[in-house]
Image: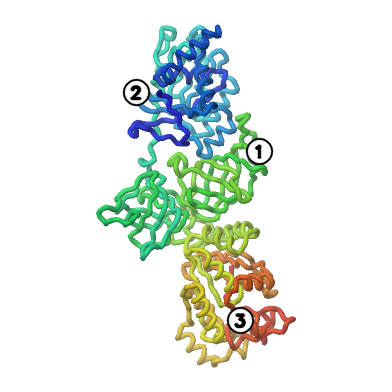
Amino acid sequence: MNVQISRQLHPVSPAGARALVRIVIVGHVDHGKSTLIGRLLHEVEGLPDGKLDALKAVSARRGMPFEWSFLLDALQTERDQGITIDTSQIWLRTPARDIVLIDAPGHAEFLRNMITGAAQADAAVLLVDATEGVRDQTRRHGYLLHLLGVRQVMVVINKMDRVAFDAGKFREIETEIAAQLAGLGLTPSAIIPISARNGDGVARHTSSTAWYRGPTVLAALDAFVPARPPHDLATRLPVQAVYKFDDRRIIAGRVASGRIRVGDDVLIMPAGKPACIKSIEAWPERETSQTPRVAIAGQSVGITLDRDIFVERGDVVCASTSPAASARRLRARVFWLHQRPLAVGGHITVRIGTAESTAVVAAIEEAVDPGLLASDGAEVIAQNHVGEIELALSRPIAIDPYTADPNTGRIVLEFEGRIAGGGLILTAQAAALDTTSGPRPGKVASTARASRTGVNSDELRAKASALAQVFASLSPAERIAHLRREVAGKIVFTTSFGLEDQVILHLLSERTDDIAVVTLDTGRLFPETYALWAQTERRYGVRIRALHPRHGDLETLVERDGINGFYDSRAARLACCTVRKVEPLERALAGARGWIAGLRAEQSAHRQDMALVTAEAERGLIKLNPLFDWTREELLAFVSSNDLPVNSLHAQGFASIGCAPCTRAIAPDEPERAGRWWWEEESKKECGLHSHRP
Ligand code: SF4
């Protein structure tokens, strides 16, 4: 039996080396699709033994003329009875190659499958009924191929026997369909007159079409250029996870395209960091001489690099000679499934490979009703409709257009926490400026203002704004996780061992994120705070990095203002805070692209003007206050239920605890930060750590 039926979405040729071409057949069911498929199966001897004879005998017994379409009906019946045959994807073996014929039964479902990657076609057969000529539906089918980006098309003019193999009729249809397709940017590889029922023009020419000089259907199928197999494309390894193992950082993922070899130079995109593949790991561990040296597309691997650079889930290890673009904007053709139409300005989550980003819909064009297969001119994409959209991403992502790499050029859209669409990436617009580690390949100049860090301030603000909207409905833990995914590069959490800080550290301890924890040791902290610091390190098994004031600055300060000069004037107090806190903070945040702090709006009137997420343009980072909207009651409840270690001074009436000389206990009716710099005016009581110019 030679009918090979595959339930795999992307069938693999059993012969391995034989070329595989996936061909979609589009055309009205009455135009002879089933007849052509049945005839093709017969011509390549692809039918089960005896099947044809049995069907002919059944037809004869019933007094009916045999029809080739019965074949597909019979196969469908067998499938319904549990035999593993799927007539929506039929495998033909011609002398030259393997062909998967993909039947396109309904536009909506078929478009969805094609666009979301459930099916792929390298080429198409467009079927036209000679008795009807080019009709509206033929035009729609041409439009369908245009939508799907299928560039190789043959046109088959079927039922030529019904028009007496009239060459004039054929030429008329040929001219019209060629013009129609040209309008869609398609040039058919062949336009073939056939009679699928009689076999004329399918596998061989007959005298009926002696006036035709082109290929048969089988010859034209064999002439389609197969898509390049994934291992022949440029190397792409989307990073699924990074594991610390011994002293190694193992980057795990599935090779999507190309091949990974030990010694290959690669670029980690979107940051564009260069590296060299040091090893491909094997489990269980083997002798060095037996470890793999190469892995090809389809294989899951763990690799190590020759240098210690920051790599995270969502990055893509790329061939250094042909990297993916680092893009902040992209254009995609998408199928939308959600009940609520997708509109310009809508916020969605975008997944490309293992990368994820929030995005804003910047433009919608060519919204199409798949039932009509014509643009409806709307600027929204309704449920089950198709359209071209432009997305502004909140962070750069490594992106390939679908035409460059079908394996990585697909996009999944999420809305309200569930998959709401998918599509093909048409173009990627390179990131205007690197927000993580300097210039990247392919970047374009930006007209937006850049800060001293090289970060584009306008883009940073746009990103903070987009994140703020998304974060509003998330829990603190989810906000931190989202920030880690959205911000490529170093993220720093600064703790002063307050209640909020202890909650955040507890949340961080439940994750494996690469987030640095630092504290600013002013040299004037309470002994109780130092005790809590040590207790916290023991509880979570971490070493919290301390930044101290610069010795020279401290000497100058004390010499000028005295050891407690901060009581004398606000200027002296701010100078002390600058030397002991703000300057060390700048060192702690140097090179960071994210900052997590424990601010809550409720703490003071001044802090109510702050925000959950802000862009700190001068520092070139996004700042997240994950507990910003928490009440003190929520805070205390979390501390209690998780038995968190807290400063023993809280039991003595201290609320917000800073440096010992500048902090006192508060009365029950005083606001939380009343005990800090109590001698100063309420509205001015910030130390400068959180007063940075955004
Ligand atoms: Fe100096 Fe007081 Fe500021 Fe601490 S809180 S740095 S002691 S002024």
Residue 252 found in image quarter: bottom left
Quadrant containing the C terminus is bottom right
Disc sitting over residue 573 in the figure:
none
Q: Mark 3 = which residue?
A: 657
Query: Real-space Cα distance between discs 2 and 1?
Result: 48 Å
Front one among 20 and 442: 20
Residue 246, image x and y in percent?
36, 65
Front one among 11 and 623: 11
Residue 144 found in image quarter: top right
The amino acid type found where label 2 is placed reads Pro
Dot 2 or dot 1: first in sequence order is: 2
The amino acid type found where label 3 is placed reads Ile
Q: Mark 1 = which residue?
A: 378
Q: Residue at x 39, y 30 (%)?
A: 225
Q: Residue at x 65, y 39 (%)?
A: 382
**Does residue 649 appear left or right of residue 494 in this picture?**
right
